[in-house]
Amino acid sequence: MKIPQAIGCVVVAALTWGAAARAAGPEGATIRGTLTYKGPPPRMQPMEVDHDQSCCAKSQILPETLLVSAKGGVKNGVVWLEGVQGEKPWPASSGILDQQACVFLPHVQVVAGGTTVQFLNGDPIIHNVHTWPRTNESISVSQLAKGAARPIKRTFTAPDEIKVTCDVHKWMSAWIIVRDNPYFALTGEDGAFEINGVPPGSYKMVVWHESLERVERTVKLEAGAARVEDVELKSK
């Protein structure tokens, strides 16, 4: 059966638009903004290092639980979109949490669900890796000093916000955010974020920070357009 040219054009156009939306190529949407905090600036008092000082007290350890720039930008906030069905590749992620001079590095990271995270010990002393997940399985494992320790490997399958602590050194903490799609951003010192290549549609935007309130909004993104969503965060 011969398909009329007009109908054929409509079908081809629909298929082409659908593929573009899924891949979020040139017609993909962008959402950007800045996370700010308008409360009193946090006091950057050095953390108390009460033992293993030969390794842990070589320099001052400052808290990273709330880092705010002079202009109010919030570092280490994570912004993500839920419900996106697209083909955007995941950004490169090491999936490594190291311990250097009794500090977890990095303090916050985002990994894909199913990622095997390696916990390393770069210090000449014993540490402990203790995770505090909401949905994934918790671990609490001692780790020998550098040179004697093997990496601890754990796979986190479900979306989660996982706090990591060291039971040996009470001041140590970090966060691993597990997501099920690559439409997220981790803020730097200025608090700015940008998520691009998003298929057009309406989605839930979630803003997470370890010390500040969680914010959820519904955002509608249009093909080829950029939407600005600045968020002022408050204390929990």
Image (cartoon, rainbow, N blue to C red):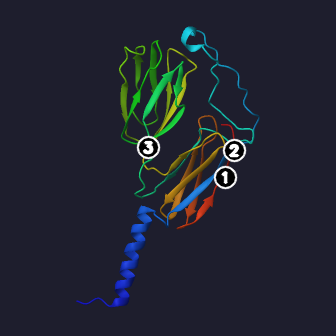
Using the numbered discs, state the Cα–Cα distance from disc 2 to disc 1 in whole angstroms. Answer: 8 Å
Q: Residue 94 shows which numbered tag?
A: none
Task: From the image, state whether disc 3 or disc 2 is nearer to you.
Answer: 3
Residue 74 falls in image quadrant = top right
Q: Residue at x 45, y 13 (%)?
A: 126
For marks 2 and 1 on the same chain, the one whose residue lies earlier in the sequence: 2
Residue carrying label 1: 230
For marks 3 and 2 on the same chain, the one whose residue lies earlier in the sequence: 2
Image coordinates of residue 66 in percent, x first then y, are 65, 33
Amino acid at pointer 1: Asp
Residue carrying label 2: 36
Closer-to-camera residue (66/91): 91
- SS at badge 1: loop
Which class describes the residues within 10 Å of circle 2: few (<14), some (14-19), or many (20+)? many
Amino acid at pointer 3: Ala
Amino acid at pointer 2: Thr
Image coordinates of residue 156 in percent, x first then y, are 39, 36
Image coordinates of residue 33 in percent, x first then y, are 64, 52
Q: Are marks 2 and 1 in contact (CB under 8 Å)?
A: yes
Residue 230 seen in this snapshot: yes
- SS at badge 2: strand
Residue 56 falls in image quadrant = top right
Residue 23 drawn above or below residue 78 = below
Residue 23 drawn above or below residue 58 = below
Task: From the image, state whether disc 1 or disc 3 is nearer to you.
Answer: 3
Q: Residue 92 shows which numbered tag?
A: 3
